[in-house]
Amino acid sequence: MSDSTKRRGTKWIELVSYKKFELVALGAVLLMLCLIAGYMIAALAMQLFEDFLTGPAFAEKSSLQDTFGLILSVLIVLEFSHSVDISISKKTGPVMVGTVILITILVVARKLIFVDYASAGIMTLLGYCIVLLSLGVLYWLIKYSDRERTPARPDH
């Protein structure tokens, strides 16, 4: 066996070992995300129960902001754990960039729920607008480039 064949074989074993490590690491991350999601869902249920006991006061802005913020936080964790689960089941490796951008858009949207628009300056609001617009354009560019690289499937 030549030296170059041995080197390729060693690199292949290292790659396979790294893929296994990556899957184990993603599994650990998924487990932690599931624990966080379970805790957050329980906290949300308790929050909703307390909110319903307050009666009409539940409809106040601050109470609704807290509740919807917690709901969006749960959705963010669930979306992230779903993307990790897909990475594990399809063995694609780390989470896809497009998914991370979508999760970031959700995080910014959650932040916008808590903004006090009466006291927020125009530059702050403009900054949020620019961030969301940039993330939207970036997501579109990534999806557009994926469509360009993926060959069209023939119709059956």
Image: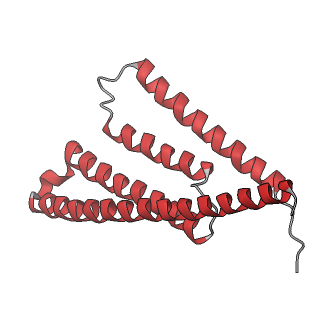
Q: Quadrant of the C terminus?
A: bottom right
Q: Considering only vertical position in the picture, is 31 above or below 77? A: below
In the depicted structure, whether residue 137 falls above or below residue 67: above
Relative horizontal placement of residue 61, taking residue 27 as reference (left or right): left
Residue at 9 percent of width and 62 percent of height: 53
Residue at left 70%, top 46%? 142
Q: Quadrant of residue 140?
A: top right
List the single residue furthest toward the bottom: 156
Where the N terminus falls, by quadrant?
Answer: bottom right
Residue depicted at x 25% and y 62%: 39
Query: Is residue 13 found left or right of 74 in the rendered image?
Result: right
Query: 22 or 116, which is in the foreground?
Result: 22
Q: Nearer the viewer, residue 112 or 78?
A: 78
Kindly indicate the quadrant of the structure image that contains residue 56: bottom left
Residue 47, horizontal then vertical, whole percent: 18, 58
Relative image position of residue 125 (x, y in whole percent): 43, 26
